[in-house]
Image (spheres, rainbow, N blue to C red):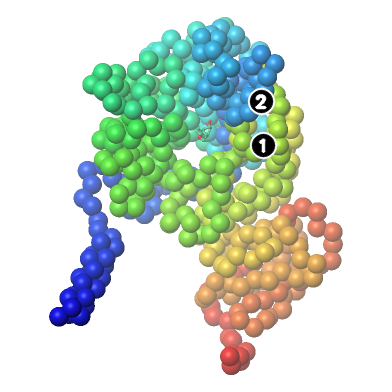
Amino acid sequence: MKLLFKTWLVISCLFLSITAGAQQTKVLQHGAHRTGKRTDADMARWRGYGLGQFIHWGLYSILEGKYNGKNYNGAAEWIRSWKEVPHATYDSLYQKFNPATFNATQWAKMAKQMDVKYLTFTTKHHDGFCLWPSKYTNYTVANSPYKKDIVKQVVDAYTKEGIDVYLYFSVMDWNNPDWRYDLKTKEDSIAFDRFKLFTKNQLTELLVNYPSIKGLWFDGTWDNSWKKSGAFTDSLEQYLKTIHPGLIIGSRLRADEYGNRHVDANGALMGDYEQGWERKIPKTYADVHGNDWDCVMTIPENGWGYAEKWLGHWKTTNELLEMTAQCVSLGGNFVVNFGPKADGSFRPEEVKNAKEIGAWMKVNSTAIYNCEYAGWEKQDWGYYTKKTGTNKVFMIVFNVPVSGSLKIKPAKNMVVDKAYLLTTPNKALSMEKLDHGESFIHLPPAAYKQPFVIVLETKEGKEKLEEQKAKT
Ligand code: 1KN
């Protein structure tokens, strides 16, 4: 009897754990609007960008990451949250905002030379200061000595250079008295309702004022107040898309009705692409869960706004290029951040990075733009990308082995017809077949000092495997 009871217990526990483990799809009112990627032309264009530029510019740029002679250890654009800085002092900085040498055309020309395909620009960071003349607050550039609309100049100049513009917008707003971190009282909810309307008004204003923009990049949406506003965030996203068809919005805007962010209670992405890759890059294709995504990256270790002093490592151009290649090889875009000075000029280190990236792109950009995940097994020499809609696979080589021979293993059903250096298309590289579907590409002996690209012309087909399997 005892044994029977024990058996019954084991069986019922097993049953319980199986049913509990089974993924149950919840019926959501405010979950993802689709599963899988968007399939329209606007999103296809986004997918082809490869490389983008981020710009953080605002009142924090005036303080340059220091106050009263002391350096702030955090990211310079967060300096208002430092206990050393009185809020009243920070909130008066707009009276000094007068960027004498700001020239949007020069910015756009530098970006063009760097060969970025899109820009994400801070219209309003957490401090709440608006770089456009919003009519919903006085805390804007219109009330600074500079007076003129910065966002308009940036949007127009970049658009003229053929660079698509996305607007960064922080929902969290330290300047608006109705902002709440949580909704604990009735008063909180009443204030936050006003805040939600304010947010909707400002976003409408941006879309109406700057109709050529392609999307919005949200930030500051992680607090409980916003997470408890799932229904609102859902209706807001749908509304923004009705006034601007094709608009691209990442996964940071919304929460579902359970307060889940980025992915809903069923694991589906909310928004058009995943916005979780901030200062980090996925390692494998499995990590991106079949979603579109972009990675935003600082050149120093951390810090987006201008700081006089950078403690720590400054990324080299080759590191930034490698990150670009890695992102594109895994189906994402890579976005490099710049933090101009308060006067509107870029620091020389950033100018140098931009120039050097542009010089490399001039030769090699075909391996970056309109390229996607190739589906070939990753090798130690670098990254594969595949030109979307073609049979061209690129090898972006960062590490040349001492042997001078690069191993490749094409995806199943693909064979390589021809391999050549991008810069010498008429000289085929010698290839040698190995077992297990692998081959070597033998490089001509040379001192390889920069990353370079090998083009593989491929076709559909199966390699004839003649090797014998080892008995083990
Ligand atoms: C660790 O918490 C944060 C919070 C906000 C880290 C970064 C940020 C903001 N997102 C970046 C894109 C910058 O705008 C940074 O201030």
Q: The disc labelled 1 sits on which kind of residue?
A: Pro
Please tell me which residue is depicted at 66% across the width and 25% down the height of the picture. 307
Spot occupied by residue 354 in the image (x, y as percentages of width and height): 69, 37
- Return the residue nearer the eye: 459 or 324: 324
Give the image quarter of residue 101.
top right
For label 2, the residue is 307
**Mark 2 packing: few (<14 Cα in 10 Å), some, or many (20+)?**
many
State left or right for residue 151 relative to residue 24: right
Ligand 1 near label 2 (Cβ, under 8 Å)?
Answer: no
Answer yes or no: is residue 282 visible: yes
Q: The disc labelled 2 sits on which kind of residue?
A: Ala
If you read the primary sequence from the N terminus, does the residue marked by circle 2 or circle 1 appear first? Answer: 1
SS for dot 2: loop
- Does residue 210 sit above or below 436 in this rendering? above
Spot occupied by residue 24 in the image (x, y as percentages of width and height): 25, 58
Please tell me which residue is depicted at 70% across the width and 31% down the height of the picture. 310
Which residue is outermost to the right? 446
Please tell me which residue is depicted at 15% across the width and 80% down the height of the picture. 1
Ligand 1 near label 1 (Cβ, under 8 Å)?
Answer: no
The mark total stands at 2
> Disc 2 and disc 1: Cα gap in Å?
10 Å
**Mark 1 packing: few (<14 Cα in 10 Å), some, or many (20+)?**
some
* Labels 2 and 1 touching (C-beta < 8 A): yes
SS for dot 1: loop
For label 1, the residue is 300
State left or right for residue 339 relative to residue 168: right
